[in-house]
Amino acid sequence: GAVVSQHPSRVICKSGTSVKIECRSLDFQATTMFWYRQFPKQSLMLMATSNEGSKATYEQGVEKDKFLINHASLTLSTLTVTSAHPEDSSFYICSARDLTRETHIQYFGAGTRLSVL
Amino acid sequence: AQSVAQPEDQVNVAEGNPLTVKCTYSVSGNPYLFWYVQYPNRGLQFLLKYITGDNLVKGSYGFEAEFNKSQTSFHLKKPSALVSDSALYFCAVRPLNRDDKIIFGKGTRLHILP
């Protein structure tokens, strides 16, 4: 299947700093990527849909100024958690679709575990 | 509201026995249905999908799932469990009127006992 790379896998930061997470489609172009947040023992919550060359579409209740998304190319989307606080600690996962193959399947990155001290 | 239900937080099965992980959904129309598996500190891996056609779909690692329209269910099954099947399993639904968005169940942790 298609490969999605997410970096870093784990990050620990101080409260008030910003953290950038990268999501790359390695062997396909992704016009649309998705960012999820997963709390312990809970399901994935869609945060936003990242669209190449345009603004991201955020889900209700997700602060767009807090979670900045940039999709500058067909293979890269970034999520920046600005002024991170302990409540932002979570597991963040990105996904993408390969429109040249199976359009209904989302391929997921390995996730980023963010710990804010 | 559209939703996906996985009624069991955890399922324990002895190795070699058949396993079933349950999933029901509440979505209008005929959605696309998926199963994903997640290993510790990893992203989700696609297992199988139902779009249309035969109600029994086969996927990766010997898993299969049966679509039941009348019961709005899509249970995941495997005839003979392996210890390596131990993981977190998510059922997911893509309603046809929600563009690309997928609704995930809360997940079921599967423990295969040696």
Image: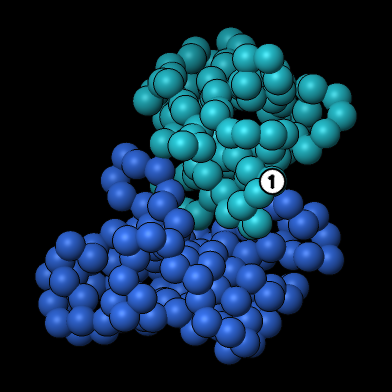
Chain colours: A blue, B cyan
Give the residue at x 63% y 65%: A96
Measured from the top left, where is residue B94 in percent x and y? 63, 45
Relative placement, left or right, of B113 versus B18 is left
Residue shown at 13% from the left, 77% from the top: A15
Q: Residues within 10 Å of mark 1 (few under 14, many from 20)?
A: some
Q: Seen in the image, is A11 located left or right of residue B23?
A: left
Q: Position of residue A59 (x, y in %)?
A: 43, 62
Chain bearing mark 1:
B
Residue A42 as seen in the image, left or right of residue A14:
right
Q: Is residue A43 above or below residue A59?
A: above
Front residue (pair B18, A37): A37
Query: What kind of element bears circle 1?
Result: loop
Q: Is residue B56 left or right of residue A80?
A: right
Residue B113 on image: x %, y %: 45, 18
> In this picture, is B3 found above or below A58?
above
Quadrant assignment, res A83:
bottom left
B59 up-or-down from A108: above or below: above
The residue sitting at 63% across, 43% down in the picture is B95
Q: In the rendered image, is residue B1 in sight? A: yes
- x%, y% of residue B69? 70, 20
Mark 1, residue position: B96
Total tally of numbered discs in the picture: 1
The one nearer the camera, B20 or A61, is: A61
Residue at point 15%, 82% (across, down): A16
Residue B61 seen: no
At label 1, which amino acid type do we have? Leu
